[in-house]
């Protein structure tokens, strides 16, 4: 595996982690707002 390939793979993993983190925070916010309504 070349350095260029390793870099792109790292970028993809980072982007995926960020995406998951954003979705998680969205879900947490939804749960909090639901608790307030309940």
Image (cartoon, grey):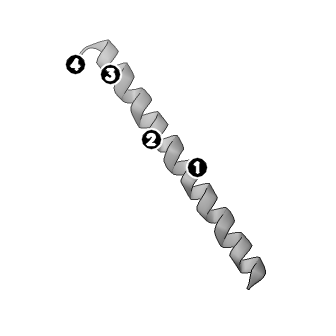
C-alpha span from label 1 to label 3: 24 Å
- Residue sitting at 63 percent across and 64 percent down? 28
Which residue is at the front of the view, 3 or 16? 16
Left or right: 25 as drawn, with respect to 32: left
Q: Is residue 3 left or right of residue 10?
A: left
**Which residue occupies 73% across, 71% down?**
33
Q: Which of marks 4 and 2 is nearer the N terminus?
A: 4
Q: Name the residue under label 2.
A: 16
Q: Find disc 1 in the rendering and name its residue.
A: 22
Viewer-nearest of discs 3 and 2: 2
**Residue where numbered disc 4 is placed:** 1
Cα separation, mark 2 vs mark 1, equals: 10 Å
**Mark 1 burial class by Cα count in 10 Å: few <14, some 14-19, many 20+:** few
Q: How far apart are marks 1 and 4 (CA)?
A: 30 Å
Q: Nearer the viewer, mark 4 or mark 2?
A: 2
Pointer 2: residues within 10 angstroms few (<14), some, or many (20+)?
few
32 relative to 9, above or below: below
Q: Position of residue 23 (x, y in %)?
A: 55, 54
Dot placed on the residue nearer the N-terminal end, 1 or 3: 3
Picture quarter with the C terminus: bottom right
Question: Which of disc 1 and disc 2 is earlier in sequence?
Answer: 2
- Residue found 41% across the figure and 36% down from its top: 13
Asked if labels 2 and 4 touch by Cβ distance under 8 angstroms, the answer is no
Query: In the structure shown, which secondary structural element does the residue marked by tag 4 occupy?
Result: loop
Give coordinates of residue 35: x percent, y percent: 71, 79
Instruction: Report the disc number at residue 6.
Output: 3
The correct choice, above or below, for 15 with respect to 8 in the image is below
The answer to whether mark 4 and mark 3 are in CB contact below 8 A is yes
């Amino acid at each position: 595996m070349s350095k260029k390939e390793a870099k792109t793979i790292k970028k993809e993993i980072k982007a995926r982690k960020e995406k998951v983190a954003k979705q998680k925070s969205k879900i947490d916010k939804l749960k909090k707002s639901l608790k307030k309504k309940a």
